[in-house]
Amino acid sequence: MADTRQRLIDGAIDTLRTHGLTGTTARSIAATAGVNQALVFYHFGTVHDLLQAACLAATQARVEPFVARLDQITDLRQLLALGRSLHTEERAEGNVMVLAQLLAGAQTSPELAESTAASLHLWIAPIESALTRLLAGSPLADLIDTAGLARAVSAGFIGLELYEGVDPDGAKAALDALDRLAVLIEVVDDLGPIAHRALRAKLRKKKF
């Protein structure tokens, strides 16, 4: 029973990769999974419910090894390097296509939007934790909203994954710009305590 559910979840993801959202039907998912079409409705009720379950299950499977790698990084440049590596892996495995299809479907389906948002949060939460850890002790720490920054970083990488398909050079330039920003933060962190205090004072005056 559990094996059939997993085959349907895997089949839904594979069908999204190859046929897109409009071509992902109970019939096409069942054909990919190698099971009877009626089992889609028996196990999940609707194709939408299956896609919701598949979205969360597939994301969880990808996030778990990512979190283990996150725990090993010690600075922002390593975080960005990990992001680049993940970006390459996701595109090679066809997961960028799946994400694009789910985001498109979420625009008109509140149910799919909810599960897609929950899946994205699985990425955002460990990134937020890593940013909080990496920025601890920085003069910028109490001036940066790490929750907002984690979402901005995640949204940026999602956008770049889609953007790379039409402008790979532009996507690379954007990633390079993030690298330079990480170096700038490292330079700030290397300043002495007097410079730290002056910088904090200056930034607080500019803070809205």
Image (cartoon, rainbow, N blue to C red):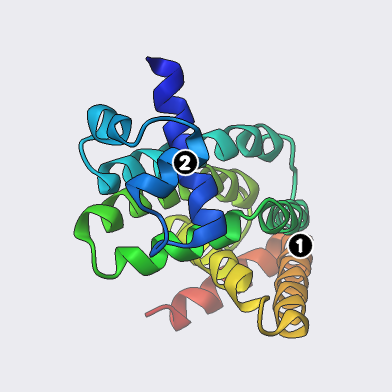
Q: Position of residue 150 (x, y in %)?
A: 50, 57
Tell me if 106 is positioned left or right of 110 in this view.
right
Q: Position of residue 38 (x, y in %)?
A: 28, 33
Tell me if 47 is positioned left or right of 172 in this view.
left
**Quadrant in which the C terminus is drawn:** bottom left
How far apart are labels 1 and 2 at the CA level?
Answer: 52 Å
Q: Is residue 23 above or below residue 34?
A: below
Reading the image, the residue beneath label 1 is 186
Nearer to us in this view, 120 or 138: 120
Nearer to us in this view, 86 or 68: 86
Q: Quadrant of residue 188?
A: bottom right
Residue found 61% across the figure and 52% down from its top: 135
Element carrying mark 1: helix
Q: Please tell me which of labels 1 and 2 falls first in the chain.
A: 2
**Quadrant in which the N terminus is drawn:** top left
Q: Position of residue 116 (x, y in %)?
A: 36, 53
- Most extreme residue toward the top is 1
Dot 1 alpha-carbon crowd within 10 angstroms: few under 14, some 14 to 19, many 20 or more? some
Nearer to us in this view, 90 or 4: 4
Instruction: Tell which tag, 1 or 2, sits nearer the viewer.
Output: 2
Q: Is residue 78 above or below residue 30?
A: below
Q: Which amino acid does the dot numbered 1 rest on? A: Glu
Q: Which amino acid does the dot numbered 2 rest on? A: Ala
Reading the image, the residue beneath label 2 is 31
